[in-house]
Image: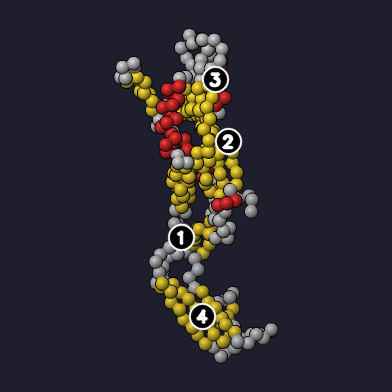
Amino acid sequence: MLGQQFYHETMRKVVVSFGTIFNNINIVRKNNSGAIIQKMKVPLAYGPAQKFLTRLDNDPSLKNKVAVTLPRIGFEIANLAYDPVRKLNRVQKFKKVKSTDKDKLDVQYMPVPYNLDFTLYVMAKNSDDALQIVEQILPYFQPDYTITINDMADMGIKRDVPIILSSVSYEDSYQGNFEERRAIMYTLTFTAKFYLYGPVTSDKVIRTVQVDQFTDTKVNAPSREQRYTVTPNPASADADDDFGFNESTSFFEDAKNFDPESGTDK
């Protein structure tokens, strides 16, 4: 089982897709008369909130010309857990005709359900900036927002991944004297329900099914009496084509039996 190398980048696709949702959030700032004086796109980065807060704490004063830009959005993976509620039949398979060999099938067992938890941080230096960002996020999660991921391009599998908003919390890290920077932070937790896929293997396409029936069950040499055969129609059909079947029934009195190694009756 283990030892066969494969990597479908499924988790990577989920992480990238999650970040893309929040990659185009903008805020505006207005003066007392209501005129827009500034419009900016909120930067997004992968990393824990403590990393950004530490940089804020290390800036000695507001006199420095270089500091962490606020507002800012950051996110990170919080947890990965198996989801038994969405378990699929483990013996079922996905099948697709191999692109390089029409006589073979790419075969893959049903995927395994997992939940990937994310923590999203919204950091701002004033309340209005933070509220603008949060208000552009929350209406889309009721409580879930569904994205479509190209899970397995080689197998032609696309799957909807619901991302569920679990909770929202608020924190104001304003401390100390007037010169120290303030950071308002909203923490949003999400759960993405996705599937992990195993390796892809190859099987030959079955073009003939043959069943021999016996009326006598002699232990040493039972003889067949009837043969039922099914072949595709047309015979050149691939596994993913729209095709019918040819069925035939033959009767025998020669006491012979089919030899699977030679493919003949003996």
Tell me the CA gap for discs 1 and 3: 58 Å
- Give the mark nearest the N terminus, 4 or 3: 3
In the rendered image, which residue does mark 3 sit on? 173
Please provide percent x and percent y for residue 174. Answer: 53, 17
Secondary structure at badge 4 equals strand
Q: Mark 1 or 2 closer to N-term? A: 2
Whole-percent x and y of residue 109?
55, 56
Which residue is most to the front?
Answer: 33
Q: Earlier in the sequence, mark 4 or mark 2?
A: 2
Q: Is residue 26 left or right of residue 118?
A: left
Which mark is first along the chain, 3 or 2? 2
Give yes or no for contact between labels 1 and 2 (Cβ–Cβ under 8 Å). no
93 over 130 or under it: above or below: below
Say which residue label 4 marks: 228
| 149 to the left or right of 262 | left
Residue tagged 1:
97
In this view, the mark in front (1 or 4): 4
Mark 2 falls on what kind of element?
strand
Which image quadrant is residue 242 in? bottom left
Q: Is residue 30 left or right of residue 227?
A: left
How far, Cα to Cα, is label 4 from label 3? 78 Å
| Marking on residue 78 | 2
Question: Could you tell me if residue 13 is visible in this image?
Answer: no
Report the amino acid beneath label 2: Ala
Q: CA distance from mark 4 to mark 2?
A: 58 Å
Residue at image position (45%, 19%) is 126
Kindly identify the amino acid type of the residue bearing the numbered disc 4. Answer: Tyr
Cα distance, mark 2 to mark 3?
A: 22 Å
Mark closer to the observer (4, 2) = 2
Going from the N terminus, do you reach mark 1 or mark 3 first? 1
